[in-house]
């Protein structure tokens, strides 16, 4: 399923495009695994639950810290919404696996003894929800994605300052330079430069 030819998009393989802009799976993409595909940046309910339990195992954290840590561990590919984290925390509290505590002046959550026993006894079942969120995306694609977002942010700042004509020229030249890479005959010659 490659693009650029008859019937394909001009930018190449749509799976690569989705991975660059939306992470593994992208909108409507497949993340695989034993439970089939998933859409976009949404994780299954069990992934949120597993991530919360594994993070709280390391010590008390509030909801905001948990969201930030999930995003950090997945290089920004998965940032659960407060609408998925807080109900999951409430459910874990109702099940007696976590309890709310005052920590650093905020309401945080820590594992109960029952929660520690649950995590230790179900570690294999909990798996690694952070790896599951990032699996299948080449590290080089992720690096390129980061640079691409930096360029986009810079372009937006330039546009806000009113220099859109200059920005268009620079971006058009960057696009031509990228296509020039594709037009080169020997990929090994590029690696030497």
Image: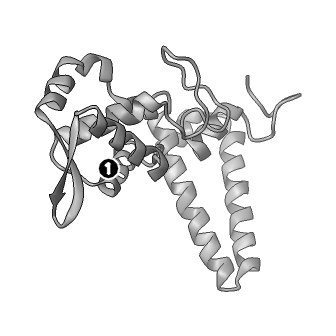
Q: Is residue 112 in sight in this rendering?
A: yes
In the depicted structure, whether residue 126 falls above or below residue 182: above
Which residue is at a point 67% across and 60% down the rendered structure image?
Answer: 174
Q: Which residue lies furthest to the top in this view?
A: 34
Left of 92 or right of it: where is 180? right
Q: Is residue 165 above or below residue 71?
A: below
Is residue 31 found left or right of 178 in the rendered image? Answer: left
The residue that appears at 60% across and 77% down in the rendered structure is 157
Q: In which quarter of the image is residue 176?
A: bottom right
Quadrant position of the N terminus in the picture: top right
Query: Residue at the location (74% across, 26% down)?
Result: 2
Closer to the camera, 11 or 79? 79
Residue 111's spot in the image, x, y percent?
Answer: 17, 38
Outermost residue, right direction?
6
Dot 1 crowding, Cα within 10 Å, few <14, some 14–19, many 20+: many
193 and 149: which is toward the camera? 149
Residue 20 position within the rendered picture, expressed as x and y whole percent measured from the top left: 58, 43
Q: Where is residue 133 in the image (x, y as percent from the top left)?
A: 45, 34
| Way the structure is coloured | one colour
Count the marks: how many?
1
- Secondary element under disc 1, as helix, strand or loop, is helix
> At 63% across and 78% down in the image, what residue appears?
158
Vertical placement of residue 45 versus 193, above or below: above
Q: Name the residue under label 1.
A: 66
Q: Which of 115 and 40 is in front in this view?
A: 115
Looking at the image, the residue that sits furthest to the left is 113
In this view, the residue in front, 55 or 173, is 55
Q: Which picture quadrant has residue 97?
A: top left
**Is 142 situated left or right of 72 in this image?**
right
């Amino acid at each position: 399923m490659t693009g650029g030819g008859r019937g394909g998009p001009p930018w190449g393989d749509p799976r690569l495009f989705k991975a660059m802009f939306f992470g593994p799976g992208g909108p409507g993409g497949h993340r695989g695994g034993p439970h089939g595909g998933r859409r976009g940046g949404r994780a299954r309910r069990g992934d949120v639950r597993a991530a919360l339990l594994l993070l709280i195992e390391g010590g008390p954290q509030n909801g905001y810290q948990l969201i930030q840590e999930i995003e950090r561990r997945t290089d920004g590919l998965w940032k659960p919404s407060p609408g998925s984290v807080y109900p999951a925390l409430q459910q874990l509290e109702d099940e007696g696996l976590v309890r709310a505590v005052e920590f650093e002046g905020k309401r945080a959550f820590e594992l109960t003894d029952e929660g520690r026993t649950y995590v230790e006894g179900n570690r294999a079942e909990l798996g690694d929800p952070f790896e599951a969120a990032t699996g299948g995306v080449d590290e080089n694609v992720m690096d390129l994605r980061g640079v691409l977002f930096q360029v986009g942010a810079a372009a937006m700042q330039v546009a806000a300052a009113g220099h859109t004509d200059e920005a268009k020229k620079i971006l058009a030249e960057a696009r031509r330079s990228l296509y020039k890479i594709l037009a080169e005959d020997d990929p090994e010659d590029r690696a030497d430069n």
